[in-house]
Structures are given as structure tokens and as C-alpha cells.
Image (spheres, rainbow, N blue to C red):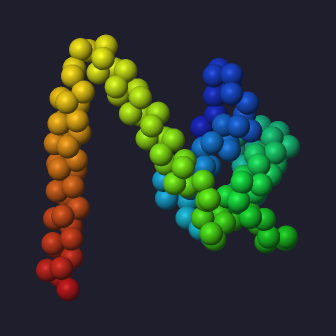
Amino acid sequence: MNIHLSTNNGVPIYRQIVSQVKYLVASGRLLPSDEVPPIRVLAERLLINPNTVARAYRELEAAGILISRQGSGTYVSNTGSPLAWAERIKIMTERVDALLAESRQLDVPVQEVIALIKSRDRLLAQPREEEAANADAVS
């Protein structure tokens, strides 16, 4: 589990941990039943106070994203994140907003941006289609 902290952005450390774990779950990089590092291990890795990690984990548990099993560890909830879809949409909304702001600054019409997105999507989908075709050929 890779978490990167910034002391310069004004966001509390525990909040950075919470949002990054939510992102990892929403993006599928952390799957249901995956174990997250113990509090002390993550605190040592991030060079922060264990209480900060404990606070983040408590918040993630309250949100239903993590579950603690006494004496066994802390895991991503089997039900998945109830916020996973909302979190994905939030992440994408932020990226779309940034893209639109930049396109306005560059004076690129929205229709051109949409056409570019569709074009790039087709290009990015090609390797997946080729992988599926290769997998079918092997079967």
C-alpha cells in the first residue's frame, strides 16, 4: 500500500491517509479482504505518529471501508466500500473539472475535448481487445 504524504498542502496527515486509502479501494488497487498494514508498521513507514494512523483507520472503519478483526489485523471490508462508486465519481469529476479549465485556458472547444477523449479511449481499448482475442485463441 503506497501512501505519499505532503506536509506543505495544509491537509492534515490523517485526512491524507483516509483519502488515499479510499482512492486505493475505489480504484481496485485494494480489494475486499486485503489486509492493510498494521498501525505501527504504517506509522514507521510514513515516519509519523501511530496515533495519526490509528485516527485514519478509525475513520475508515466508521465509513465501512476497513474492518478490524481483533488479534488478526485490519482488512478492506468484504462488502467493499459503500463510498467506492461515489469516490470514483468524485475523483473523475475533479479530473474533468481540471481538464475543462485547462481547455478553456488553451481556447480548445469542448467538442474538440470530447472528440479527443473518444479517440484516446478507442486507442487505449485496442490492447484490451487484442489481449481478449489472444486469450480466446489460446483456449
- Using the rendered view, name the quadrant where residue 65 is placed: bottom right
Tally of marks = 0
Which residue shows up at 61% across the image and 59% down it?
Answer: 81
Looking at the image, residue 102 sits to the left or right of residue 15; the answer is left
Which residue shows up at 34% across the image and 25% down it?
Answer: 100
- Is residue 12 visible in the rendered image? The answer is yes
Q: Position of residue 125 (x, y in %)?
A: 21, 55
Eyeballing the image, is 10 above or below 47? above
Eyeballing the image, is 20 above or below 133? above
Eyeballing the image, is 124 above or below 5? below
Looking at the image, residue 66 sits to the left or right of residue 122; the answer is right
Looking at the image, residue 7 sits to the left or right of residue 88; the answer is right
- Is residue 34 visible in the rendered image? The answer is no
Q: In this orientation, which residue lies closer to the viewer: 25 or 105?
A: 105
Which residue shows up at 55% across the image and 47% down it?
Answer: 87
Q: Position of residue 24 (x, y in %)?
A: 55, 51
Looking at the image, residue 94 sits to the left or right of residue 5; the answer is left
Q: In this orientation, which residue lies closer to the viewer: 43 or 94?
A: 94
Eyeballing the image, is 127 above or below 123? below
Instruction: Please state, as top left, top right, bottom left or bottom right, where the C terminus lies in the image.
Output: bottom left
- Using the rendered view, name the quadrant where residue 61 is placed: bottom right
Which residue shows up at 21% across the image and 76% down it?
Answer: 135
Q: Residue furthest bottom?
A: 139
Q: Position of residue 13 (x, y in %)?
A: 72, 34
Q: In this orientation, which residue lies closer to the viewer: 65 or 134?
A: 65
- Using the rendered view, name the quadrant where residue 132 is placed: bottom left
Q: Position of residue 67 (x, y in %)?
A: 74, 64
